[in-house]
């Protein structure tokens, strides 16, 4: 009887060991170190984490599917940004991304935005008649799905416990991407909130093999032309 008990216990321990060995590698959640300013910005520093980030294919705003692994080819650095079109913090970051895209897209930076928890009509209205300067795809359109999306899973794994998690940024290096299979990368660099522009630019320049910046990307004299007044939610 006692021998059967120990045999059963050893079998359970062995099963637990193999289960853990096969579990996806994820970051250990930690405090986000978010800097919330008086005017509502929610800045978050970049952090490199272990995360099994999976390939995806989502429809663009025109309905045509975009596969991330395919889209990344030929680029030196890719930023996947998850956003809700009605989010005030996304409005802030969209201005930053517009500047970074204009400055570094010719050098190999690719930016692709993933719509979450807002309709495609809301997203089209946000970008206006000119449209988005980079591709936009749709994972979800319903706010009630905030706990069901891949976006929700990834950001909690990296320590982001905001209600909606918009914006949420993931940098990927195409040269390190896994060529086949559902997992695209096992290590990524994330920001659990708005990018700190100077930090993001320094990171981008380093990854693109460019010298340190001689001046800021931002133009303080340029008026905010992107989007309409939005409710600040996160």
Image: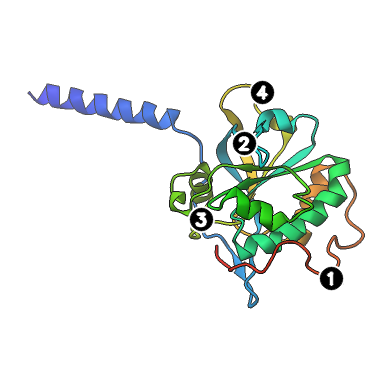
Q: Report x, y in % for residue 40.
A: 62, 72
Name above or below for residue 208 compared with residue 194. above
Crowding at label 1, few (<14), some or many (≥20) Cα neighbours within 10 Å?
Answer: few
Which circle, 3 or 1, is nearer the viewer?
A: 1
Assign a secondary structure to mark 1.
loop
Mark 3 nearby-residue class (10 Å; few <14, some 14–19, many ≥20): few
N-term-proximal mark, 4 vs 1 = 4
Mark 2 or 1, closer to the camera: 2
Numbered mark located on residue 30 in the image: 3
Q: Which residue is disc 4 drawn over?
A: 179
Residue ranking furthest to the left: 1
Rendering quarter of residue 114: top right
User: Residue 175's mark?
Assistant: none
Q: CA distance from mark 2 to mark 3?
A: 33 Å
- In the displayed orientation, state which residue is furthest to the bottom: 38
- Residue 179 on image: x %, y %: 66, 23
**In 3D space, how far apart are the residues under numbered discs 2 and 4 (Cα atoms)?**
22 Å
Estimate the spatial distance between the alpha carbons at disc 3 and disc 4, rounded to whole Å: 30 Å
Query: Of the residues under marks 3 and 1, which one precedes in the sequence?
Result: 3
Task: Determine which residue is flagged by label 1.
Answer: 220
Residue 217 in picture, x, y percent from top left:
85, 60
Q: Are marks 2 and 3 in contact (CB under 8 Å)?
A: no
31 is higher (above) or lower (below) than 67: below
Residue at 50 percent across and 60 percent down: it is 162
Residue at 82% over, 47% down? 206
Q: Which residue is mark 2?
A: 59
CB under 8 Å between discs 4 and 1: no
Instruction: Tell me whether the residue at label 3 lies in contact with that at label 4, contact meaning CB atoms closer than 8 angstroms.
Output: no
**At x 60% / y 62%, what residue is drawn?**
87
Q: How many marks?
A: 4
The numbered mark, 3 or 4, whose residue comes first in the sequence reads: 3
């Amino acid at each position: 009887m006692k021998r059967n008990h120990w045999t059963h216990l050893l079998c359970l321990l062995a099963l637990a060991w193999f289960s853990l060995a096969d579990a996806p590698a994820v970051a250990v959640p930690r405090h986000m170190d978010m800097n919330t300013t008086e005017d509502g910005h929610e800045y978050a520093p970049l952090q490199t984490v272990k995360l099994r980030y999976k390939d995806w294919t989502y429809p663009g705003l025109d309905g045509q599917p975009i596969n991330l692994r395919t889209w990344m080819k030929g680029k030196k650095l890719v930023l996947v940004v998850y956003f809700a079109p009605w989010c005030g913090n996304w409005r802030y970051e969209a201005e930053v991304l517009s500047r970074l895209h204009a400055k570094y897209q010719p050098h190999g930076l690719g930016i692709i935005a993933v719509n979450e928890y807002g309709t495609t009509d809301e997203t089209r209205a946000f970008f206006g008649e000119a449209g988005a300067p980079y591709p936009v795809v749709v994972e979800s359109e319903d706010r009630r799905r905030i706990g069901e999306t891949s976006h929700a899973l990834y950001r909690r794994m990296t320590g982001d416990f905001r209600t909606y998690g918009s914006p949420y940024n993931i940098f990927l290096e195409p040269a390190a991407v896994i060529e086949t299979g559902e997992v695209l990368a096992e290590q990524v660099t994330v920001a659990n909130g708005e990018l700190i522009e100077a930090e993001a630019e320094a990171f981008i320049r380093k990854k693109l093999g460019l010298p340190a910046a001689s001046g800021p990307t931002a133009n303080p004299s340029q008026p905010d032309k992107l989007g309409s007044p939005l409710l600040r939610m996160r």
